[in-house]
Image (spheres, helix red, strand yellow):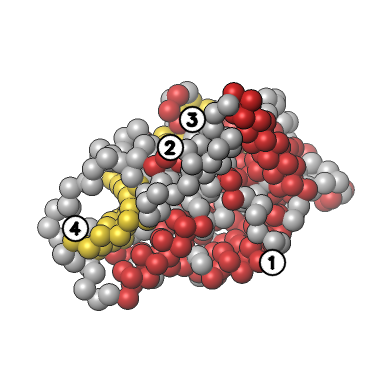
Amino acid sequence: MNTACTAPAVLEPEEALVALRADPEMFAAYNGSPLLAVRTRGPRAVEVGALARWLPCVLVGVAPDLSDLPPGIETAGFDILLTDQSEPPAPWVGPVGRGSDGQPGGTAEALAAIAAMTRAVPAASVAFTQLVRYSAGLDVRDAVIAESFVYSTLQAGTEFAAWLAGHRAARARRAAASAAAGASGVPGVPGVSGASPVPTAPAVLVDRDGDELWVELNRPQVRNAVSRDLRDGLVQAFALAAGDPGVSAVRLRGVGPTFCSGGDLSEFGTLPDPAVGHAVRTSRSIPMALLRCADLTTAYVHGTCVGAGVEVPAFARRVVADPRTTFRLPELAMGLIPGAGGTSSIVRRVGRERTAFLSLTGWALGTAAAAAWGLVDDVRPVSGDTRPPSPEPGGR
């Protein structure tokens, strides 16, 4: 998605109230603007939040600094709260380094990215925002099921269809180029480039070491992208841990250069219809299985963690990240929402406002910011080549 976009106008609270009272539908996904940005200045800003929080648009509050905020602004209903003040308290988002490049993204840059996303995929942006508005108030399992309902709805939408068509066309071009060159781009799949390699080893390795159960994502050739085999392997491993009273700790890690790069794109759009997709997601559910042993689980993450690579470990009791790890939620640009439980797990770790920021900007978050927000609990070297050392006695 092209995110080249200027920052939208930021309305004064009084201007926003006049507009909302005159025609609330002017802020909506299709027949108006899917984004409303308002300065959080004075008690009128709180009124804007109370009035707009039910509308089908993304509501962003903006403050240069936090020195003179009206009481109640953090709970007024804004989907994202932005400030140029460094290291603000939750739920505010200040300038953050955008992943490995370390370049700070301030309020203007964040607003431009959010505006670009809402213009490109208004239905997905608004559906995601509406979901996370209430998911934190649900039971964690109910929130996972609600996420699947929204994900299934968007699978039938035009935004996902457009992304899928573009993705398949790009794969076809790569396959044609590979065939013309007389070589395959994928081991074991003649003439096909971009498909997942034929598995030669289990997608998930499970190893009992005393009272510990090691669960290892084992598709390093595709950066541990979540395929059907990997999904089923994780569900079975977590069920084993939950059903064995002799297991006192679960260690979750990824083999190879990254913990997990998200869903296997070669499998996107392969189920018969969204209803079947919902049935599969809620019966063969990684989040549901992990939740049965989450209080025993420590996740060790490294590399470029994308989508499910962020969402799944966030359910664990403890997340340990390598200092060079980055975290990104790319699903909105595909016309979808996080589908591996992220609107439940990440919301509970960092709050709905910061979760919305990550998805609606599409920015990669570095480890320092992730630790400050609570997305990870400890930062120390983690490698895909070797298992991390056992924790100190009494720890997990």
Q: CA distance from mark 2 to mark 4?
A: 27 Å
Residue at the far front in the pictured view: 182
Point 38% across, 55% down: residue: 202
Is residue 359 shown left or right of residue 8?
left
Q: Are marks 2 and 4 in contact (CB under 8 Å)?
A: no
Q: CA distance from mark 2 to mark 3?
A: 13 Å
- The residue carrying mark 2 is 304
The residue under label 3 is which amino acid type?
Arg
Q: Position of residue 247 (x, y in %)?
A: 24, 69
Q: Decide which of tag 3 and tag 4 comes sooner along the chain.
A: 3
Q: Position of residue 226 (x, y in %)?
A: 48, 51
Looking at the rendered image, the disc whose residue lies closer to the viewer, 2 or 1, is 1
Q: Residues within 10 Å of mark 2 (few under 14, many from 20)?
A: many
User: Would you place residue 111 above or below residue 53 in this image?
Assistant: above
Is residue 311 shown left or right of residue 212?
right
Is residue 244 shown left or right of residue 124?
left
Say which quarter of the image contains residue 138.
bottom right
Point 22% across, 46% down: residue: 388
- Please indicate, yes or no, whether residue 353 appears anywhere in the rendered image: no
Q: CA distance from mark 1 to mark 4?
A: 42 Å
The residue under label 1 is which amino acid type?
Ala
The residue under label 4 is which amino acid type?
Gly
Looking at the rendered image, the disc whose residue lies closer to the viewer, 1 or 4, is 1
Q: The residue tagged with tag 1: helix, strand or loop?
A: helix
User: Would you place residue 65 above or below residue 253 in this image?
Assistant: above
Q: Nearer the viewer, residue 347 or 12?
A: 347
Q: Which mark is residue 98?
A: 3
Q: Residues within 10 Å of mark 3 (few under 14, many from 20)?
A: some
